[in-house]
């Protein structure tokens, strides 16, 4: 669907770099520290910038779902964490 999110995909270097860049912000949102931080899936949506939904393994079978917005290059390609949902499983779909 035009304007909608893509299907789940395996992370590439760009997505892994985004995840690393926002880890500290996500930890602040979740009010905890994650020792493991590995992206296992993502989807994206092009808007006036790009929305990303990331599924991140944080260890012990727990996953965190993140929604991150990246502004357009002319606006500095800033990253902003919009949502952090802890306590997810590998089977929980990125919504």
Image (cartoon, grey):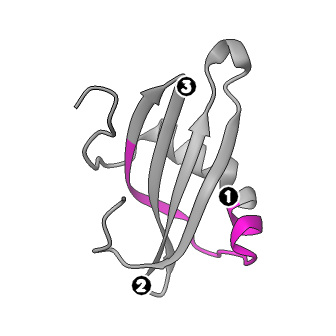
**Circle on res. 72:** none
**Circle on res. 61:** 2
Q: SS class of the residue under badge 2?
A: loop
Residue 80 percent coordinates (x, y): 68, 43
Q: Quadrant of the N terminus?
A: top left
- Circle 1 sits on which residue? 23
- Vertical placement of 29 versus 21: above or below? below
- Residue 88 belongs to the span the image colors magenta: no
Question: Which is more N-terminal, label 3 or label 2?
Answer: 3
Q: SS class of the residue under badge 3?
A: strand
Total numbered labels placed on residues in the image:
3
How dense is the environment of label 1, judged by Cα within 10 Å: few (below 14), some, or many (20 and up)?
A: some
- Vertical placement of 50 versus 11: above or below? above
Q: SS class of the residue under badge 1?
A: helix
Q: In the image, which is nearer the foreground, mark 2 or mark 3?
A: 3
Instruction: Residue 83: name its quadrant.
Output: bottom right
Q: Is residue 24 left or right of residue 35?
A: right
Question: Which is more N-terminal, label 2 or label 1?
Answer: 1
Residue 79 percent coordinates (x, y): 67, 38
Q: CA distance from mark 1 to mark 3?
A: 20 Å
- Residue 30 belongs to the span the image colors magenta: yes
The residue located at (63%, 51%) in the rendering is 82
Instruction: Residue 33: name its quadrant.
Output: bottom right
The magenta region covers 26-43
- Circle 3 sits on which residue? 49
Question: Which is more N-terminal, label 3 or label 1?
Answer: 1
Q: Quadrant of the C terminus?
A: bottom left
How dense is the environment of label 3, judged by Cα within 10 Å: few (below 14), some, or many (20 and up)?
A: some
Q: CA distance from mark 2 to mark 3?
A: 32 Å
């Amino acid at each position: 669907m035009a304007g909608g999110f893509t299907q789940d995909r395996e992370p590439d270097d760009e997505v892994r770099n985004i995840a690393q860049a926002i880890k500290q912000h996500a930890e602040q949102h979740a009010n905890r520290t994650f020792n493991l931080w590995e992206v296992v899936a993502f989807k994206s949506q092009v808007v006036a910038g790009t929305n990303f939904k990331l599924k991140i393994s944080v260890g012990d079978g727990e996953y965190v779902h993140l929604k991150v917005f990246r502004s357009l290059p002319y606006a500095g390609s800033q990253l902003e964490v919009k949502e952090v949902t802890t306590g997810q499983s590998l089977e929980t779909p990125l919504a």
